[in-house]
Image (tube, coloured by chain):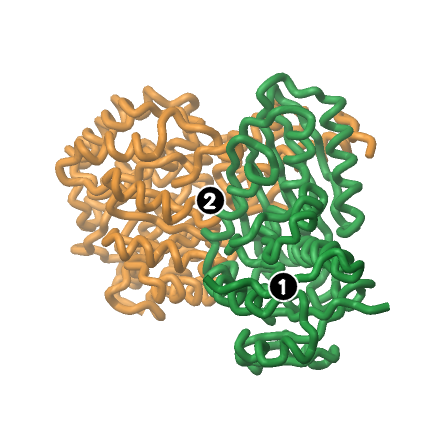
Chain colours: A green, B orange
Amino acid sequence: MKKIKCALIGSGNIGTDLIYKIQRSEYLEPVWMVGIDPESEGLKKAAEMGLKTTADGVDGLLPHVKDDGIQIAFDATSAYVHADNSRKLNALGVLMIDLTPAAIGPLCVPPVNLKEHTDKYEMNVNMISCAGQATIPLVSAVSRVQAVDYAEIVATLASRSIGAGTRANLDEFTYTTSGALTKVGGARRGKALAVINPADPPMIMRNTISCITDDEPDQAKITESVLAMIKEVQKYVPGYRLVNGPDFDGKRVTVFMEVEGLGDYLPKYAGNLDIMTAAATRTAEMFAQEILAGTFNPQPVEVA
Amino acid sequence: MTDSMITGDLRGRKVILHDMCLRDGMHAKREQISVDQMVEIATAMDDAGMPYLQVTHGAGLGGNSLQHGFALASNEEYISAVSSRMKQAKVSVLLIPGLGTMDELRSAYDAGARSVHVATHCTEADTSPQHIACARELGMDSTGFLMMAHLNDPKGLAEQGKLMESYGAHTVYITDSAGYMLPADVKARVQALRDVLKPETEIGFHGHHNLGLGIANSIAAIDAGATRIDGSVAGLGAGAGNTPLEVFAAVCERMGIETGVDVFKLTDVAEEIIVPMMDHIVRVDRESLALGYAGVYSTFLLPAKRAAKRYGVPARDILVELGRKKMIGGQEDMIDDTAMTMAKERGLLKAVAG
């Protein structure tokens, strides 16, 4: 069966893990890996796994886009270079899946709003952050039952799973995730907290999601909705699990959960990596299915 | 080895004291210190010659949250109320990246803050470059604050401190958040920093009194080259409190270490203002001792006591389990989580079927 050819930009943890996820896809094929350091482990790994590679950044990829039939690109670089990457690739008709906190395009959490974006044939969608992917489904699970005034999430990540880019730009992660709790999660106000824990052996990604509802929470309905949403996310992240709760304390609803990864590029503790790459892959697959069915034909985007 | 280490003679050393009552002390007051109380304490300290006062929510900028509790006023309200009344003292803030942001730092600066502790866990200094650079750009006195420092060895801390210095920190702190360190641990860590940092970069020590060692540890830090010491008058702080600053100032005076503060005025502040406003007497008790003994983040004390009440698992058991699971500052959500898991194991709580 024909597959949609993909380029991966950024050869760090996320980009490298994406190779594994995309290689398993029925609809996607990883063809190019773009880095900036010829010595990077990610580029070496990509070459070993049969991808074409360049260490010249996105400019090293541009001349090959047409000949190699690249239609989807995943950007796992940083918020600062994403805008440039997106502009250049959109101009060639390549659809961008943005895994940086740049958030130029609409924010996407697959079980919450992916269908909206594929219906609109967006040319750039943003995957928010690992914490966003892990927690927004559960904020949405509460807000679809009753109005949520405030959602607050705490994501604790194993130190070894956090790359240099995220560390150096932690505020972008905080801003983008906080914003997405309202825009996608459906809460009126939102706040995201991140903690990086260096314990050895590394701890599995943990998330605590708290919502303050306007009225007394309907305990039975919220519990049912939360459990149903967890099953939905488990379809693409099997290690997405409830640990404690939903706990009800007045108008506060709290869910304690963990995300275990598949152990592709980084070990299983790095569920934060998996939920990001799995969500991005699932998003790309939805677009790919439309492209393969002939209902979506990504066109070059005029440069303003 | 310097002579002082042999003789213990620290006469003539100059040390800058930094009071934490109105930040770390917020933990001990469940964030419920009013603006008026802050102004009363701060003006009395200012009058006693305290050079720096930290004023924010206990968890610093961005601290107002379900995770860390909501204070009676915003950080900006506290900071501007205090800073506008200071004759000589500088107001500082705490910023923990991942919780506080540069936007909040700029806003704190606008409200009158002129010094900041940018705090990371002792192995994660590289999450602070943006914030330290931002503080320097604003012209603030900038500190890199390495929390839970007992969880990293002297060599590791030296590397982390070097990173913070490279981002622009004027001072690097060894922060004994768990009140776990012994004087020799402090000395080794301060020395390791002194060996690698530029001569103009200062070293600080922030102690907690969970093993009753706040003063001894601070003296050990000075002996090894530290020039800045955090504490709080009457020890108002998380766990068994910070190094009690009026006591420390008295010890310094006896030893000939120059702090520039008026000891008797500070003892008046302690006795007449701070002790009367304590909800509980901040001291080494069964639970706060467990923090220091097991190496647990001091701020976990009161939430663990609340979880104990709610789930029927003793606070000491919860704290020891948190230590065993290597939970660090900021993971307050894991206190309830751990208590719930322990309650399930003990047949006190039913799991949700799913």
Badge 2 and badge 1 both on one subunit: no
- The mark lying in front, picked from 2 and 1, is 1
The N terminus of chain B: image quadrant: bottom left
Residue located farthest toward the right when viewing the structure as drawn: A1
Give the x, y percent position of residue A272: 65, 54
Check disc 2 and report its element: helix, strand or loop: loop
Q: Residue at position x 39%, y 52% from top?
A: B145
Image vertical order of residue A237 relative to residue B330, above or below: below
The answer to whether residue B223 shows anywhere in this view is no
Check disc 1 and report its element: helix, strand or loop: loop
Q: Which mark is residue A273?
A: none
Q: Residue at position x 52%, y 63% from top?
A: A302
Q: Which residue is mark 1?
A: A299
Give the x, y percent position of residue B85: 17, 31
Q: Which residue is mark 2?
A: B99
Q: Amino acid at mark 1?
A: Gln
Q: Amino acid at mark 2?
A: Leu
Q: How many marks?
A: 2
**From the viewer's perspective, is A291 left or right of B216?**
right
Give the x, y percent position of residue A225: 75, 31
Residues at marks 2 and 1, CA–CA distance in whole angstroms = 41 Å
Question: Please, which chain is the residue tagged with disc 1 on?
Answer: A
The answer to whether residue B331 shows anywhere in this view is yes
Location of residue B225 by image quarter? bottom left
Q: Nearer the viewer, residue B40 or B155?
A: B40
The C terminus of chain B: image quadrant: top right
